[in-house]
Structures are given as structure tokens and as C-alpha cells.
Image (spheres, grey):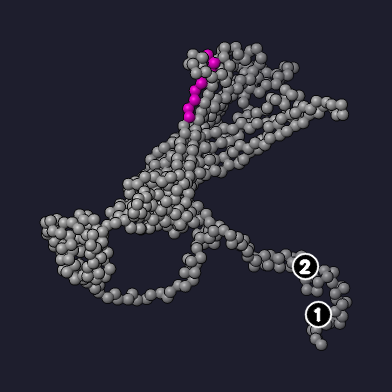
Amino acid sequence: MSAMFLPSRFQKTGDWMTNMKTNRSGCPICGGWKPAFLLACGLWLGACTATRPPALSPGHLGGASPSAVSGAEEIPPAITRAPVLPPPEPAPPVETYTVVVNGVPVRDLLFELARDAKLNVDIHPDIHGSVTLNAVNQTFPQIMDRIARQVDLRYQLNGPNLVVSPDTPYWRSYPIDYVNLSRDSVSEVSVATQIATTGGSVGENSGSSRTGLQNGNISSTKLTNTGKNHFWDAIEANIRAILGIGASGEGASVSGETDSGGDGPLVISNPMSGIISVRAARREHEQIQAFLDKVMNSALRQVLIEMTIVEVELSDRYQAGVDWQTLATGSGLTLLSSLTGANLATAPFFSLGYTHTTGSGRTISSTLRMLETFGNVKVLSSPKVMTLNNQTALLKVVDEKVYFTVEREIVDATINSPARENYFSEIHTVPVGLVMSVTSQITEGNNVAINVRPTISRITGYALDPVPKLLNANFDNLIPEIQVREMESLLQVADGQTVVMGGLMQNKISKDRDGVPGTSETPVVGDLLSYRDEEFTKTELVIFLRPTVIKGAGLGFDLERYRGYLPDAADRDGAPDKWLRAERGR
């Protein structure tokens, strides 16, 4: 059993339940200030509560790899005192030899060299020839290489054993770390205009120049770029050219020339595993190795292409008119006019007004307003794409706008059914947005030759298909009108330099004149009885381009400034604001 101890003020009354009933607030502690007490408790609890950060999906890419995280957990203890390094041991002197011979048999020379170098030597019986050599203070491998250039032989030095054999073809495998992919890219930009002339019909085209002039004026420009990147086929063809053998058949994976002995040069490639095996002589293997080193060094270069597309708008506006409404005041006339351009009430403008008060107290005002807006800059897009050397990259950020084409089919009436109409619709899509294709070539000096083609499209309006109206159909078919701004160029830029590709300029002139019919076009009186609104707008599309040669494609290397775009950037020091400020300052 548990005991209950009541406060002293309730013990005096002698009845807990009686005091509970007599308390109007219903709370023996709060009394009449229960709302204030609850509000204070709520504020106190709210101040102690922290907003729980949203949990990120584990499927997002993080800022650190699992290996980096595991390595960060095992931090070694701090080193308070640097260890004393022992003095470096002197490297043993490289033994050199001096050989001066003239027309000496190669077998005798090899025996003398092996004896002086204290090596065991095995010489194949097919080794023949003479050597003329003048070598002063050169190492043993250097002298053997010079001898192998005069006599067809190859040597292997395994510890104290020297094996010399004829330079016959032998197998060697070369690793080729490149994706097994063949790519063909075709880019086409074309513009064609055709204007009908008197006596001709648009669409007729003849081979005769005289007939063409009669039918219409045709102007067309077409630019087609074709790129082929068949890496593995090109490597095989190049190795065959080095070996001096013909091309293989269509689709063959083994190429070479077959002979009766079966020991001629041969090339076997396996793109799936990234291996090319070649049977060739030592000299040919040296040429193949040097060629592959240069090819792979160039093929694995990559570049980051950054582009910013900016639209700049310049607008000049002029308005002029006379307000004649005050003439109707007190004269019994009713005059409604809008000749002072009251709609020009936004943005900074220059206003010049003239007010004249007549003897009767009436006022005539004339107003001239001019508006100039410069530097209305809008960034349309800022795409970034990274690609390998001589590979085409395509970036497409568009909205697929949908429209329909409708066909009507009339079914004739029969004995059992009346005539009816069937409608069929076909769906079409048109991309609206940004499409950019880039092909780059990186030189050894980190200069980048770029073929770039940005395309920006947008819907400017809709055109009404006249066919439904001609068929007396009860529907309208709207076809989108697309504005396309496109540029294709080939240029060379240094690493990290920003260039301006160019600008696409568009001028728009709008002139409106409202006035009293019949008098607004009179030379002098027309300006007093009319309102003019003239606007000149110039829009220019400027494209900035910057290539950056990437030597280390990782967040800890050349791509460090993009770490702030990762989903977990807010959990690191500095939050994303640090990275955004860095991007704006670039």
C-alpha cells in the first residue's frame, strides 16, 4: 500500500475532492493562470527541441569512398619526434667496358665479353656474322644492344647466365586498357530558304539554272561532320602495318600472313579482355611497344568542357502623345483618349512634359517618355561535360513537348448503317531545351582543339492547322512554333583559358501609332492627334567556353571544386555555401 501526502492548504480543508470541485480552473496547481502556464511550458519545450536533419538516401554518391573511410578510422598515433634516418649507403659502381673491334666474328666477341663480365654464356649454333664496334666505358646491356643491331640476335640475361639466340619471331602480349567500343558520330547543320517569284511555283526544282531562277530563289548551306572511332580496328591495322603484313578479312580476329613454316608474324587481339598478342622479331616488338606507348598516352587523356550560355537584352523605348481630355472639361463634350502612354510606368525612364494653361483655365499637356534598359543578363544554361581524347560527348537537357496531328476518315453510308466520321490522332514530340555535342583533341602541350555544337530551342507560339477548319471539324489542331539558336565551330584553346565562341544577335523593332482616324497621318496635325509607342529590342546570345585538361579525375584531385554538389555536402565543414562562393568567384 502506498501513502499520499497532501499539501498543507488542502489538509486544512480536510477534503481533497471538495477542493477539486471548488477550483474553477480545474487544476489545483495552476489556478486561474492555466493558459499562461501552458504557453510557458510549450515555449520551453520548443526551445529545447532541435530540428532533426533529414536522412540522406544511402544510394547517393558520398564524398569519400569506403576505402578512404576505413583508412580514416585507423589513425596512427601522432609522431612527437622524427626518427633519425641512417646515412645513405653508397651505390655500388656500375661496371663498364671498352670494346674496340673491326670485323670480328660475333661468336668470338660474345665469348670475350662473357669472360670479362664473369658470366656463363650459351650461344645458339645459328649465330653468325661479324661486328665492327667502338664502345668506350659502356655497360654490358648497352654493348649487347649495339651488337644486336648489327647481327640478328636477341639475348636474355638471367642472373649469371647469358643466353644468345637468333632473332626469330616470338610471342609477346600487350595489355590495352581501352573500352571495347566502336563509335560513329554524324552531325549535320543545314539551312535552306526558297522564295517564290512571279510565274513560278514553290517546290519546283530543275537542273537548269534559268528554270531555277524562274521557279524560285534557292539558297542553302549544309555542313556535315562525320567522326569514326574504331579504336581496336585501328590498333590492329597499325600493328599489321608495322609488321608489314596485309589486312585481315572482314570480321577476322586473327590477322597475319601464313607460310609453310607457320612461324611468320601474326596478330591476335581480344578486345573483351584488353589483350593483343603479337608474334614478331625483337626489333619489331620494340617498334610496337614504342608505338603503343604513344597511342595509349594520347588516347587516355581527358578534358572537362565547361560552357555558359548567356542572353543579354538591350531595350530602348520611346513614347509621345498629347492629352486632349481637358478640353472637354466644362464644355459639354465627351472626349476619351489615351495618347500619353500611361502604360509606361515601370523601370527607369526619362519623361519630358509640357503643360499649358489657357485663359479659360484649361490645361493641355504633352508628354514624351523614353525608356532604356541595358544589361538584362540571363544565364540560359551552364553545362559541363568530360570526355576522352577524340571522343564525342553529347549532353541533352530538354523537355519533350507533345503535339498531335489529326486525320479524319469519312465512311460512306450503307444499307445497315449511316455515314460516319472517324478521327485518328498521331502523337509527335519536339525537344525544347539544350543539346550540346563536343569532340575534343588534346595535344601534348595541353592545347585543346574542340568541335562544339550547342543548340538552344524554345517554343515561341502555336500555329493553327487550317485543315480542320476547311473540313468543318469542331476542333483546333495547334502546331508549336520552335525558335532554334544553334552554333557549330572548330577552335583551339589553351588549357584553362576562357574564350567567347561568338554571339547570336537578334533585333526586334516595334512601332505602334494610335490616333484619330483620318487625321493621324497628316504631317503636322497628325502628331497632335496621335500616340506613338516605338520600342527597339536587341537580344544577343553569348557563349563562353573553357576546357580544362584533367590529369587526376577524382574529388581529391582536379575535380575538388565540385565536391560541394554532392548530397552530403551540408554535413561537412563549411556547408555548401563555401563551395557556392568558390564557384561564383571563378
Left or right, residue 239 beside residue 555: left
Q: Which quadrant of the figure has residue 24?
A: bottom right
Tell me if residue 550 comes above or below residue 491 in the rendering: below
Tell me if residue 170 comes above or below residue 489 in the rendering: below
Secondary-structure class at tag 2: helix
Residue 388 seen from this side: no
Please name the residue that numbered disc 1 is placed on: 9
Q: Earlier in the sequence, mark 2 or mark 1?
A: 1
Please name the residue that numbered disc 2 is placed on: 34
Disc 1 marks which amino acid? Arg
Magenta stretch: includes residue 541: no
Left or right, residue 442 beside residue 218: left
- Towards the viewer: 122 or 363: 122
Magenta stretch: includes residue 220: yes
Disc 2 marks which amino acid? Lys
Secondary-structure class at tag 1: helix
* Crowding near the residue tagged with mark 1, few <14, some 14–19, many ≥20 C-alpha atoms within 10 Å: few
- Towards the viewer: 522 or 16: 522
- Towards the viewer: 525 or 513: 513
Rendering coords of residue 538 (x, y %): 51, 30
Residue 279 seen from this side: yes
Start and end of the magenta stretch? 214-222
